Image (cartoon, rainbow, N blue to C red):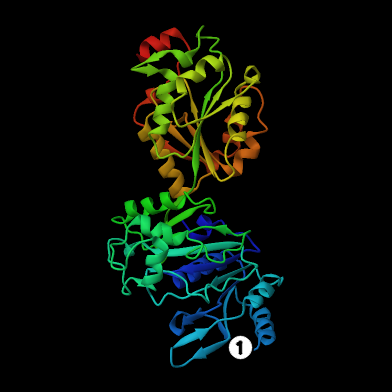
Amino acid sequence: MRLSKAIEISRGDVVSIVGAGGKTTAMFRLAHELASDGWRVVTTTTTMIRREERGEHTILEPGQGRLLRKARAALKTENHITLVSGFREAEGKLTGVEPSLVDELISLPEVDAVIVEADGAKGRSLKAPAAHEPVISSSTTILVPVVGVDALRRKLDDTVAHRPETVARLAGIQPGQVITPEIVSKVVVHPEGGLKDAPPHARVIPLINKVTVAEMQPARDIAQLLLDEPRVQRVILAAVAEEDPVKEAWERVAAVVLAAGESRRFGSPKQLLPWKPTTLLEHVVDTALASSLGDVIVVLGHLAEKIRDLLRDRPIRLVINHDWDKGLSTSVSAGLGALPASYEACLFLLADQPNVTTELINTILSTYRRTLAPIVAPAYQGRRGNPVLFSRSLFPELLTMEGDQGGREVILRHRDEMETVEVEEEDVFLDIDTAADYDGAR
């Protein structure tokens, strides 16, 4: 996946990149992707970058007014330019621009996006900012704290971390201690660490860099911990030096279990049917709870007061749909209405599908993280089934559905964007509608 897709950058965005472990490479990777799409992109720094890391078309000009004029002229023929204000011979570094210039740049009609390296790390994989940094412009719309996953399992010292004493203080540990995912996540989301001076309106999207196959699980562990911080919208797992840099993008994904119907065809509440040691509804809820989903929301309707007692001791959120008799779409709406704003996707599970496994749910989640497709669903020999994951971008369309449509019409409209997960057995899709279905499934 491309970095620009994982960040979901839009025209008019200012991306400020902080932290350690590949900021400059990430900046130029993002700029290259956008420029190849025809965007006019400015890269710069509010601190310093090494001379050898400058862009192909670099403008050095100490005067802010002249720098702006040269930038506008250059963007008539170039899609990507880099702006710096000077060069320090002794350090071999290009000096950056004032934050106010970044604010002016993004207001120019010639500029689609500005990407800023907003602090330094001396080539380390983990860092804590000094008192004078980061230098973040007020126009920043996306803040990307970067960390190198190769810092893990190493002792905290100045070979791996920039300002290790400050890193230790923020993480509540001693210098020399072995770096763990918990330590990394604490530093990245600390208000004096990766979130220092984060503009209140900016989206925060941490980037875990240098991820290899061997480091994928530790990177996932960090991502899961970072999502405990409310300000974090998404976590990107990547190797930004590669042409296809993003391995996964982690977001908060909830489950909505649709269990509000009266089971008219069956003749009695299916939710209460015995299934293994529990009931059908409990089995489906427990399957969702055992997965790597976030919140589990259960929508009840018919006989809600009787059914809710089944779930009293489970860590779920119950929603009562008083309009359950108007069709499945009302339960979809009730579930989405209970979804916290921080959740970026939702997996809809049916309470009468006992063969859906935790493994299948996790495979759907993994596919979503690799693709960020707006819809992910299982399929058997070309036939789509449930459960189905929808991204937040499609929630408004789901909320317009009426009757028993659920998300079928939305899927049809976006089938070309949908990703499918192939299952080996068709009985995964079994839904229990009749007594014969139930007897056969048991």
When asked about the image quadrant of residue 341, the answer is top right
Q: Is residue 297 above or below residue 196?
A: above
Q: Residue at x 53, y 77 (%)?
A: 132
Is residue 21 visible to the viewer in this orientation of the structure? no
Instruction: Decide: few, some or many residues near mark 1? Use Cα within 10 Å; few <14, some 14-19, many ≥20.
Output: some
Q: Who is closer to the viewer here, 154 or 212? A: 154
Q: Who is closer to the viewer here, 203 or 110? A: 203
Q: Is residue 397 above or below residue 286?
A: below
Q: Is residue 124 above or below residue 395?
A: below
Q: Residue at x 53, y 52 (%)?
A: 233
In the rendering, at what x and y percent does residue 278 appear? 37, 18
Q: Is residue 5 above or below residue 83?
A: above
Q: Who is closer to the viewer here, 26 or 185? A: 185
Is residue 216 visible to the viewer in this orientation of the structure? yes
Which amino acid, mark 1? Glu
Quarter containing the C terminus? top left
In the rendering, at what x and y percent does residue 209 appear? 40, 62
SS assignment at label 1: loop
Q: Is residue 423 left or right of residue 142?
A: left
When asked about the image quadrant of residue 437, the answer is top left
Q: Is residue 153 left or right of residue 325?
A: left
In the rendering, at what x and y percent does residue 267 appear? 51, 6
In the rendering, at what x and y percent does residue 74 appear? 64, 80
Q: Which residue is mark 1?
A: 61
